[in-house]
Image (cartoon, rainbow, N blue to C red):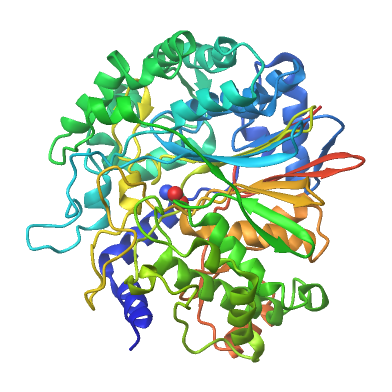
């Protein structure tokens, strides 16, 4: 067996990992109907939110002339819309959206987590990215996620508690994006989130369902238990939940900037929660928080069907892996075969397998390890890899390629898992700036630790638990002090002739890559409008079985099976949020699998 094949067998054969995957996939309540999600309290923006939910339920996109905002919860989108309506930029609106999401969708993202953002600047015509990934505390050891015998910990044993918590990046990103591209008054961007936290917000069906299914894991730490189980009972759909601690935290950041988070009383609450976590303390310190920095990096762009698909490079594998998939598919005409043909999905599925093989071997935090970043998306390399797809059947075996002879050729394969989680924000403002941001606390409810009214991330479990593979090769994505764990987050802006035409991204752990690639293919190759593109079936391959949603036409599933794919049928809670930019105006699309909405003006 090859090294890659061995790694795959380990991944598929690991009871603990497979168990964790199943457990989290099961936590996926159906998207609620328009009527079930509260949208009241934003005055003239209540009706657009209801209209947007109705459009989503009916499979129609939302259109507008000047600006558009989409995110995973109507209240957060309304807060962003209020900023845009008042003339704020996409960066301003993002601060309002993120701070409300941290309240109403606390399980997915927030001040205790990290994020990646890609920005198209209308004035300069330039695209850039902000890396606000969590960092490993300086006190950790490479064996952080191993037991006394050097064996990897069970996944959830590592997740719950202080050990998995990395230095949060999102608060600093809010400030940096606002300083670079905002023009609204900083403090006012927190108003809606503070009011909702003080007065209470209506618990959505999805949040209530997730709390109920989490049960005991959320009761391990008192601050978390007290919040999600007021008076001993799990919060219920439609009930009002207040979060005065979060309101206080937001007031401090509104007044004092991100420093109020990284130094002083809030920082002390965060480190006390991490270091004092019963049974599983962590290593995050005051100096880790004080030293945290957001890094501006060039966008990683790949050409696809005469467009430039741009996104987040290392430490995310997002843009590189989406880019590899599209770069290989550039050599085949998917518009001819179409969305219902097994042949289209054979090509997409096996291109994805090839890309995930490279991802497992080569992709990590390139500030810490040598990485053939340019080689991975070199069109000549991808054209060579694409030749492997020329047959009629699923590839019998897939291994990492050779994208450049560097020290990286000696890496072992990483089998780290990333479970469905996270959230996505897409915004275009009236000045023509475009923002795509994927933001996370990693697992649903992160480490399950709360401080200052927000949940703390478990992002460090995105590192490989092992330092070497079974053949003794070192793993690029192994943990080290100060390093950022490899991500799959793929906030994306698609450009045509240097102008943005599509803003897209999704939550979903390592499935993000397939969700984003699908939406781009559905729109560019198959001519679907953005709502149809995000809603279209998810069919993915992350270097194993073909993950398919229930209800696909028999001709498609039987065709794929006949080609040699093993199908893994189950719900896939993508949360694609997209905006398409046309000369006639903006078109927003929102994933019907979650509670989000698009509002335009
Ligand atoms: N933790 C999800 C991701 O970074 O891909």
Compared to 595, does 353 lie above or below? below
Q: Quadrant of residue 9?
A: bottom left
Compared to 292, does 317 lie above or below? below
Q: Position of residue 335 (x, y in %)?
A: 81, 72
Specify the farthest residue to the top. Answer: 255
Judging depth in this view, the residue of 117 and 536 nearest the camera is 117
The mark tally for this picture is 0
**Quadrant of the snapshot with the C terminus:** top right
Residue located at (76% from left, 74% from top): 334
Residue located at (37% from left, 20% from top): 261
Q: Does residue 549 appear anywhere in the picture?
A: no
Q: Position of residue 420 (x, y in %)?
A: 46, 53
Compared to 547, does 432 lie above or below? above
Q: Position of residue 436 (x, y in %)?
A: 63, 41
98 left or right, relative to 494: left
399 left or right, relative to 186: left
Specify the farthest residue to the front. Answer: 406
Judging depth in this view, the residue of 575 and 126 nearest the camera is 126
Specify the farthest residue to the left. Answer: 148
Q: Position of residue 52 (x, y in %)?
A: 75, 35
Q: Quadrant of residue 374?
A: bottom right
433 left or right, relative to 354: right
323 left or right, relative to 163: right
**Quadrant of the snapshot with the N terminus:** bottom left
Q: Does residue 174 appear anywhere in the picture?
A: yes
Judging depth in this view, the residue of 205 and 177 nearest the camera is 177
């Amino acid at each position: 067996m090859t090294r890659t094949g061995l790694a795959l067998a380990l991944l598929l054969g690991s009871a603990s990992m497979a168990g964790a995957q199943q457990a989290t996939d099961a936590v996926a309540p159906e998207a609620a109907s328009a009527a079930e999600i509260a949208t009241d309290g934003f005055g003239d923006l209540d009706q657009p939110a209801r209209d947007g939910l109705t459009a989503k339920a009916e499979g129609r996109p939302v259109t507008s002339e000047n600006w558009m905002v989409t995110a995973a919860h109507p209240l957060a989108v309304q807060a962003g819309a209020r900023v845009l309506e008042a003339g704020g930029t996409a960066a301003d609106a993002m601060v309002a959206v993120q701070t409300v999401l941290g309240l109403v969708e606390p399980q997915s993202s927030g001040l205790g987590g990290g994020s990646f953002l890609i920005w198209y600047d209308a004035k300069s015509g330039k695209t850039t990215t902000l890396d606000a990934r969590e960092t490993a505390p300086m006190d950790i050891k490479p064996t952080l996620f191993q037991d006394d015998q050097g064996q990897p910990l069970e996944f959830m044993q590592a997740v719950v508690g202080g050990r998995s918590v990395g230095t949060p990046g999102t608060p600093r990103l809010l400030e940096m994006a606002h300083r670079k591209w905002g023009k609204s008054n900083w403090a006012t961007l927190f108003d809606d989130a503070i009011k909702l936290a003080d007065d209470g917000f209506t618990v959505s069906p999805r949040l209530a369902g997730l709390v109920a299914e989490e049960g005991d894991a959320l009761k391990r730490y008192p601050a978390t238990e007290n919040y999600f189980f007021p008076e001993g009972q799990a919060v219920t759909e439609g009930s009002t939940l207040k979060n005065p601690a979060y309101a206080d935290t937001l007031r401090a950041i509104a007044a004092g900037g991100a420093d109020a988070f990284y130094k002083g009383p809030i920082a002390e609450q965060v480190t006390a929660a991490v270091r004092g976590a019963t049974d599983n303390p962590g290593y995050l310190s005051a100096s880790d928080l004080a030293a945290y920095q957001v890094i501006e990096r060039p966008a990683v762009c790949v050409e696809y069907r005469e467009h430039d698909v741009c996104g987040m490079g290392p430490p995310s594998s997002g843009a590189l892996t989406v880019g590899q998939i599209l770069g290989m598919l550039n050599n085949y005409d998917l518009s001819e075969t179409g969305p219902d043909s097994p042949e289209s999905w054979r090509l997409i599925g096996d291109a994805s397998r090839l890309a995930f093989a490279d991802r497992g071997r080569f992709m990590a935090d390139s500030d810490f390890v040598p990485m053939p970043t340019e080689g991975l998306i070199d069109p000549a390399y991808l054209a060579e890899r694409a030749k492997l797809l020329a047959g009629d059947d699923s590839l019998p075996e897939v291994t990492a390629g050779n994208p450049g002879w560097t020290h990286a050729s000696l890496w072992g394969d990483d089998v780290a898992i990333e479970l469905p989680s996270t959230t996505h924000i897409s915004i275009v403002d009236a000045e023509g700036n475009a923002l795509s941001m994927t933001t996370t606390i990693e697992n649903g409810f992160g480490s399950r630790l709360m401080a200052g009214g927000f949940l703390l991330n478990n992002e460090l479990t995105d590192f490989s638990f092992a330092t070497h593979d079974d053949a003794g090769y070192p793993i690029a994505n192994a943990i080290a002090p100060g390093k950022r764990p490899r991500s799959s987050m793929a906030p994306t802006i698609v450009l045509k002739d240097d102008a943005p035409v599509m803003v897209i991204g999704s939550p979903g752990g390592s499935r993000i890559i397939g969700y984003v690639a699908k939406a781009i293919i559905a729109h560019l190759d198959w001519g679907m409008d953005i709502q149809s593109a995000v809603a279209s079936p998810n069919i993915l391959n992350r270097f194993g079985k073909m993950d398919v949603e229930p209800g696909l036409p028999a001709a498609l599933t039987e065709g794929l099976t006949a080609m040699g794919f093993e199908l893994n049928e189950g719900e896939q809670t993508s949360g694609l949020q997209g905006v398409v930019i046309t000369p006639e105006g903006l078109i927003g699309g929102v994933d019907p699998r979650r509670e989000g909405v698009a509002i335009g003006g």
